[in-house]
Image: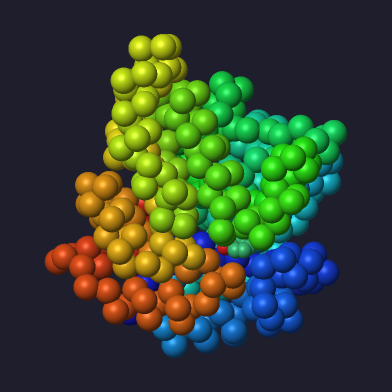
Amino acid sequence: MLGKITLEDHFNLPDFAEKAKWWAGLFAVDADKHVREISDVGKIRLGYADQYGVGYHILSYTAPGIQDIADPKQAISLARQVNDYIYEQIKDKSNRFGSFATLSMHDPAEAAAELRRCVEQYGFKGALVNDIQIGPDGESLIFYDKPEWDVFWQTCVELDVPFYLHPKQPTGVVYDKLWADRKWLIGPPLSFAQGVSLHLLGMVVNGVFDRNPKLQVVIGHLGEHIPFDLWRINHWFEDVKKPLGLKETCKKTIRDYFRENIWITTSGHFSTSTLKYCIEELGGADRIMFSTDYPFECYKDACTWFDGLKLDEGQKEAIGRDNALRLFKLKNV
Ligand code: GRE
Ligand code: ZN
C-alpha cells in the first residue's frame, strides 16, 4: 500500500549520539547502525519510506527523552531545544514529515504552554510523552492522572491535538525491586507495556477522560496488552470495583473509553492474528492505525507485513492511512 502514515518514528539530537549509543546498547544488535538511523531525518529515513510505501511520518524524540531528566529547568530547556531542532529539519518537507511536541512533564501549566507553542507556531500534530516523568528528587514519579493535570489535558482538547503515551524503562526503586534481577524483561518483552498500561488505566480510573471527554490518547504496540484483557478489566470494573466506589471517578465503561478516547497503533507489533483480535475486540478498525517504531523496528518488517495483510473491505486503508488523516486532520500528505 502506498501512502502509509506512521506515527511512531523516533529521532535523536545529533549532539546526543552518546546517549543514543547507551540506549542502543540495551535494545539494538547493531548499535552503530541504530545511531546512524535515529540521528537522520532526511535521506536514510526517506529512502526506506520510498522503498516501502510510507508517505508521511509524525516524528518523535526518542525514549526515555525528557521524562528521564530530574531537573525541571534542564528538562524544559532540552524539550524546547528538541522542538526547535526538529521544526528546522522538517519545515521544508511538510508533505512528508510532521512532529509530535517533546515535553517536560514536571509541571502541567509549563507542559501546556510548550505544547501550545509547538502547535501554534510550528504546526506540530500533538505531543508524545515517554510514560512517567522522574521528579526533581530523582526518585519520585509524576503521573498525569490527577486533577492538577487537567490544565494540560484541557489544552490538548482546546488545541484539538492527540497525546501519544509511549513507554520508557523502569527506574529508581521500581527498577531496584522488580526489574534489576530480571533485566531481559525490560523493554518490549514486558516492562514497556506494564508501564504504559498502568499509566493509561490510571487515567481511566482517576477520571481524566470523564473530566476531559474530548481528550484523544494514542498508545502503541497494539494497545500495550490492554485489548487482550479488556473483558476481564470490564468485568472487574463493572461488577466489583464500581460497587466498591470506582463509580465516583469513572462513570463510563472501559469499552466506552476505547470507543471515545483511546486509539492504538501497530508500532513494533507485526502479528496478523493479534491485529485481527484487536479489530474484533475493539469493535472494528476505526481507531487502529499503522505505525513502524523505527528505528527500533525496521520499515521492511513493518511494511511488508502490513502490505501483505488480508483484511475486510476498507480496513487496510483505514488502518494504513485514513484513520490517521482523520485523527490528525492531515491535508496534502
Ligand atoms: C521505542 O522507543 O519504542 C523502543 C525503544 C527501545 C526498544 C524498543 C522500542 O525505545 O520499541
Ligand atoms: Zn517507540
- Looking at the image, the residue that sits furthest to the front is 181
State the count of labels. Answer: 0
Q: Position of residue 163 (x, y in %)?
A: 50, 45
Q: Position of residue 257 (x, y in %)?
A: 35, 35
Q: Looking at the image, what colour scheme do you see?
A: rainbow
Q: Quadrant of the N terminus?
A: bottom left
Q: Tell me the residue at 48%/34% (across/down).
A: 201
Residue 295 is left or right of residue 325, and the answer is right
Residue 180 is left or right of residue 248, and the answer is right
- Looking at the image, the residue that sits furthest to the left is 313
Q: Position of residue 185 (x, y in %)?
A: 63, 56
Q: Position of residue 203 (x, y in %)?
A: 50, 31
Q: Is residue 79 visible?
A: no
Q: Tell me the residue at 50%/42% (across/down).
A: 197
Residue 242 is left or right of residue 279, and the answer is right
Q: Quadrant of the C terminus?
A: bottom left
Residue 191, relative to residue 303: is it above or below?
A: above
Q: Which image quarter: residue 52?
A: bottom left
Residue 46, relative to residue 234: is it above or below?
A: below
Q: Nearer the viewer, residue 282 or 108?
A: 282
Q: Is residue 210 visible?
A: yes
Which corner quadrant of the figure contains ligand 1?
bottom right
Q: Tell me the residue at 37%/33% (across/down).
A: 233
Residue 57, relative to residue 146: is it above or below?
A: below
Q: Tell me the residue at 31%/20% (across/down).
A: 239
